Image (cartoon, rainbow, N blue to C red):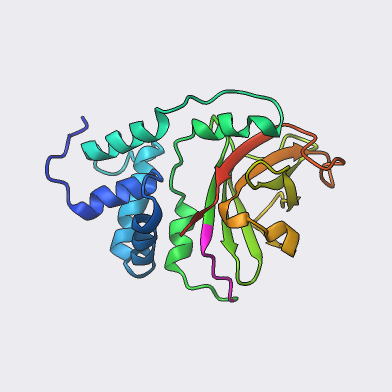
Amino acid sequence: MTSEPTDMPEDDALAAEFALGLLEGGERAAFAKRLREDRALAAKVTYWQAHFAGDGSEIEDLAPPPRVKTKLMQAIAPEGARKKGGWLGLRGLFGGLALAGCVALAVFLMQPPADGFAPQYHADIAAQDETLLLTALYDPEHSLLEVTVDAGAAPTGRVLELWAIVGEAAPVSLGVLNADGPSRLTLTEAMAAGLTTATLAVSEEPPGGSPDAGPSGAVLAAGAVTAL
């Protein structure tokens, strides 16, 4: 039986909102900064991520505070997701996503980078049905983008290719992603232009990547780049 909290501590409520991707702007950045130093707070985020993913069978079943539900409904209510072909349909795909916080991001924030990689931006890239989930971390100072596939994979005989879409411009390929393990992409000046305000998209392509200037296969997932 799920209990409805009436006096949940502020940190628990914030952790639930962070896990669902509902914190924005300065509030999200401030919370992410705290995660780097507060392991107890990171544990709260991990709890809610497991709870919302339906993997909380071994922990006390608590309902998130009402304000979390309100924020979530505000995030997903304005526009339902619509299936459209090609990259022009990305706004419909992205509009209906309830972006979940990623465990990998919380773990990364808790561990100081050993190789100088210091991301300042991230994107939760998700398919409409969440069968494909990726996390992108961007370090503009070193023009490095690291992408991790958290769930799902390319169809058999195909590869995943990452694209950046800035405003109304045509998509720019950022590279083919590794089938196993994180992909560390070094971006050219042209690739990095406008990336901090871009939408990242992933398409399925033939081995070696798209033979065209844009995606030749189906666009499977998308997510907006935001500051940490």
Quarter of the rendering containing residue 53? top left
Image-based side of 85 in relation to 11, left or right: right
Q: Looking at the figure, which quarter contains the N terminus?
A: top left
Q: Residue furthest front?
A: 168
* Residue at the (42%, 66%) spot, across then down: 110
Where residue 116 sits: x, y (%)? 58, 76
Identify whether 192 is placed above or below 171. below
Residue span colored magenta = 116-121
The answer to whether residue 116 is above or below residue 61 is below
Query: How many numbered tags mark residues here?
Result: 0
Left or right of 96, for residue 93: right
Residue at 48 percent across and 24 percent down: it is 80
Identify the residue at image location x=73%, y=64%: 189
Asked whether residue 61 is in view, the answer is no
Give whichever of 153, 205 is nearer the camera.
Answer: 205
Q: Residue lying farthest left? A: 7
- Which residue is most to the right? 211
How far from the left and from the top, in percent, is residue 208?
Answer: 84, 47
What residue is shown at x 87% (from left), y 41% (from top)?
A: 211
Q: Position of residue 9 (x, y in %)?
A: 17, 52
